Image (cartoon, grey):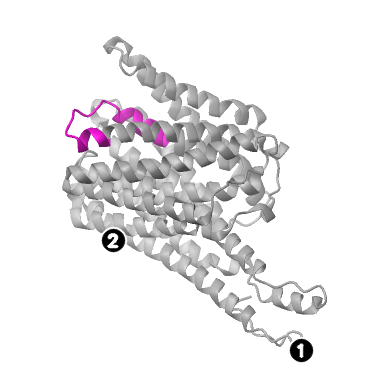
Amino acid sequence: MQRALSIDRSPPLALSLPFFLNVPLFGLLASILAAWTGPELFTSRWHPAALALTHAWTLGVLGSAMLGSLLHILAVAANVRLALPGAMSLALWGLLSAGTLLLIMGFMTWQRWTWLLAALSLGAALAAYLGVMAAALWRQRRQVFPGAREILTPVRLALAFLGLTLLSGLAMLLALGLDRPVPNLLDNHVAWGLGGWAGLLLMAMSFQLLPIFQVTELYPRPLVRWLPWTLAGLLLARWALEPLPGPWLPLRELLQYLILLSYALWAIVTWIRLWRRKRPKADVSTLFWYSALASLLACVPLGFWLNTPAGQGSALSIGILLIMGALGSAVSGMLYIIVPFLLWREAQQAVPFDADKPEQTRELLRLVPKTGHYMPQSAARRHWVLHSAAVLVWALAALGGRVFAWMAAPVLFLSFAVLAWNLWTAWRRYRECLSAIAAYAPTRDTGAGPRCPES
């Protein structure tokens, strides 16, 4: 593993910005749906509104963020650049967004045409994305940075499980749309999506990015090498045992426990490294990582309690802790790192370079705000507080807290409203910086040109 990023290899901001904007938009939509449904939302994880909200999160919030960020992280951390033109990226974003909206509509209205259109849109978007990723990983396999080869194993495994998640989801969607019996793929669809695609990708990113941005120790080499393969094997073994009769049930339950404990091992190792980080002050991304790890570790006792007669209602709470808590917290923390960095990089690239006028170039570069000025820590911490409160409120509501069920939608709305405002603030400061660069008068004395806010 390496502790450096090649930022000059990062693709343009326009490639992933639409994906990042989906995060607050679908989060706000999820909160509105929760308010519309009311406490009834928490009666069952099979409630139509619960299914709609689950996919608003997994596709609209988490999926959009992970697909967009992977485009940049593979380029700067592993030297894997994707041959993805801006028009194609926009088309993928449009298909993903439209398919997610159609899927939400399908769960809320139960109209067959929505299932078919959702299957067509999501199938085209994710299949094209996987094709582009597979081609880039194969074509540039010999150009990968030596220190980044280890993280590509969990990335490849994550993409493989995204393919399995897509295939199982399409099979169920097409069955609903064509009014045919729905295949028994739901449990595997959930396991592949959360434990395979999202979990392994989060693990891969932690191996590479935490030592860089949090200045932590490197992960133990045996864990980096073998844990992703172990998890993949457990998930596939669980799938292979699915159709076997009742006597195999204890073994299937054992595999579920082992998957949960494997992720708990990664969470404990990550927590220890964050606690011993060399960076003295915890920034907001550190806080989001703590929230993610705490949510994941909270699933361990709930997972064991689930198989007891008194714990049957904990399944919904586990889902909330995994989706909103573990993955949602990690995605939010990632946005506060990657978005300011990309805006700063784009602003720097907007500065015209003139070898004959180095003073002018230096003066223009001073107009570019530092990364910490696009989304200030104080505003980001407000979002962390609201997000953590939302995770806690939703988990308690799923466990039967009636008061918390009424609080769930407003707290979630406030959390995503603050995130939307923070992203808008960053974008506004970026645009103001571009305007200041364009309005700069080279005839002025050094230091007299217009300044970006908080530059």
Toward the bottom, the furthest residue is: 444
Residue 313 shows up from this direction: no
Q: Quadrant of residue 259?
A: top left
Q: CA distance from mark 2 to mark 1?
A: 52 Å
SS class of the residue under badge 2? helix
Q: Is 52 left, or right, of 129 in this rendering?
A: left
Tell me if I can see residue 394 in this picture.
Answer: yes
Image quarter of residue 234: top left
Q: Residue at x 31, y 15 (%)?
A: 249
53 and 402: which one is in front? Answer: 53
* Screen quadrant of the N terminus: top right
Q: Position of residue 186 (x, y in %)?
A: 29, 30
Nearest-to-viewer mark from 2 and 1? 1
On the image, the x and y values in percent for residue 416 come to: 38, 60
Q: Residues within 10 Å of mark 2 (few under 14, many from 20)?
A: some
Q: Nearest the camera: 349 or 151?
A: 349
Residue tagged by mark 2? 410
Instruction: Look at the image and give the residue range highlighted in magenta.
Output: 173-195
The amino acid type, in three-letter code, at marker 1 is: Asp
Residue depicted at 48% across the width and 56% down the height? 87
Relative image position of residue 379 (x, y in whole percent):
49, 67
Residue 397 within the magenta-colored segment of the rendering: no
Please check the rendered image and state whether residue 181 is part of the magenta-colored stretch, yes or no: yes
Of callouts 2 and 1, the N-terminal one = 2
Secondary structure predominantly adopted by residues drawn in magenta: helix
Numbered label tally: 2
Asked where in the image residue 326 lies, by quadrant, the reply is top left
Residue at the extreme right: 356
Quadrant holding the C terminus: bottom right
Identify the amino acid type marked 2.
Pro
The residue tagged 1 is 445
Residue at the image position 56 percent from the left and 71 percent from the top: 430
